Image: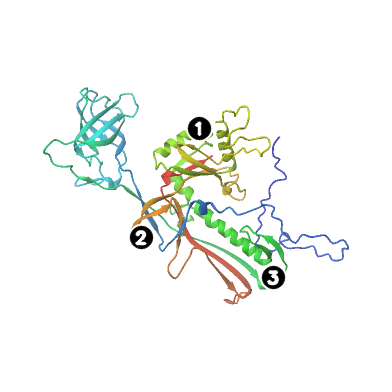
Amino acid sequence: MAVLPTPGFDLQPSAQQVPLSTNYITNFDFLNQYLPDTYEKEFERYGNRTVSSFLRMVGAEMPSNSDLIKWAEQGRLHTKYVDCASGSAAGVSNATITVSDPLVPNRGTIGLTAGGIAVRVGQTVLISDNAGLAGSNKGIVTSVNTAAGTFAVAYYEALGQSYAATDTLTVFIYGSEFKKGTEGMDGSLESDDFIFENNPIIIKDKYAVSGSDMAQIGWVEVTTENGANGYLWYLKSEHETRLRFDDYLETAMIEAVPAAGAVAGGAAALGFKGSEGIFYAVNNRGNVYGGGHPTTLLQWDSIISRLDKQGAIEENVVFVNRDYSFDIDDMLAQQSSNAAGGVSYGLFDNEKDMALNLGFTGFRRGYDFYKSDWKYLNDPTMRGGLASDGVDGLLVPAGSTSVYDQVMGKNAKRPFLHVRYRASETEDRRYKTWITGSAGGAQTSSLDAMEVHFLSERAVCTLGANNFFLFKD
């Protein structure tokens, strides 16, 4: 048996641009002696319909007064190259190593050729065969050609080079050695910083009602998603426009992409910039798990191994859709010693007189992982049920990180995810709302209507995207 497709959930939009029978009462047959009993209160059949709250849970908001937001993130402290080769055969006592890794322009050495390899005379290196068949060597650097990306090394081992000239090698620096009475280190290394930027986008919405419609008052008792309740009429639609706008403030920060290229008719050619949303940033600068959900400890170990190579953040929150949440619960349930014969897993044994708890809120394996359902991924009017470009979860590191804020001109602590909105001493564009027209108390124009406008200008900053994981099905 399975869930039948009909009757199903309703995707009919609740917001219409014209008066329809679905949003006006049309039963005005007062000649009928059998008048119906009516409920004056609106029934909330979809519960809380909003999908925002994600950024409020994991991020913060702070002002910015520029069209461009820039920040610098630290690079690696140590030097390692993974695509190298020796120009000599096995057994030689010294060799020339060629580095083929892509070079970071600002990672050259002062006094030497800028943009070259970050290897200097006198440093000691470990050189290993990537295939793991020929072993490794340790040696000291005797000369460097930064422009050509090569350095000469003299091996410490008596048997000399252990790998062949055709092997692909990994090299990392572990120290240095100098003879008595010699000069110091030749040249110095520049810091390896990565500069990232994002630009805010302007988000707008509007609700309008004519003056004539405002004169035909009818009331409906409602309870709203933000906890308010009371009797509303046309202000109900205004209120739902506000709730919808609140959702878009968050989903735009999640889904935004930069406008690329200048193809005729494209967004960039029309003058739109776009912005880097969270999914875009993590997909391009972070980690991606594709092809389904990690449902075994071995698969989670591969995620943990990748996190070890990144920032190694101790605590992480995994925001998931319902299917992924159940997969994590099932995986953790299988770790119980009594999983085959009962359901005793959890902090307390499940007893027959208590509600059976079949879910988990988190687990620890190397790091702490807390699980949280993300309504945005489940909502059928948003990402829920997408057949392509499916995102089933997002791993977000907890806490904050230190970055160099180029606007402030100093290091600052920032949450990994935070929103920057445009603001100055005279203009705050975090969340603007104003009324125009000539109805409802507004007297700003000759328009026989009341228009409620909403506007925000903002961008999301994804700091340390290399610590995030995007789970794609």
Q: Which residue is mark 3?
A: 213
Q: Which residue is mark 1?
A: 297
First reached walking from the N terminus: tag 3 or tag 2: 3
Quadrant showing the N terminus: top right
**Residue located 72% across and 70% down the image:** 217
First reached walking from the N terminus: tag 1 or tag 2: 1
Q: Is residue 2 visible?
A: yes
Real-space Cα distance between discs 3 and 2?
50 Å
Q: Amino acid at mark 2?
A: Met
Residue 455, above or below 126: below
* Residue 179 x, y percent position in the rendering: 14, 35
**Residue 441 image-quadrant placement:** bottom right
The colour scheme used to paint the residues is rainbow
Q: Are marks 1 and 2 in contact (CB under 8 Å)?
A: no
Crowding at dot 1, Cα within 10 Å, few <14 / some 14-19 / many 20+, comes out as few
**Left or right: where 193 falls relative to 110:** right
Determine the residue located farthest toward the right in the rendered image. 33
Looking at the rendered structure, the secondary structure element under dot 3 is: helix
Q: Nearer the viewer, mark 3 or mark 1?
A: 1
Query: Which is more toward the observer, 285 or 336?
Result: 336
Residue 367, above or below 47: above
**Left or right: where 158 falls relative to 276:** left
Q: Which residue is mark 2?
A: 408
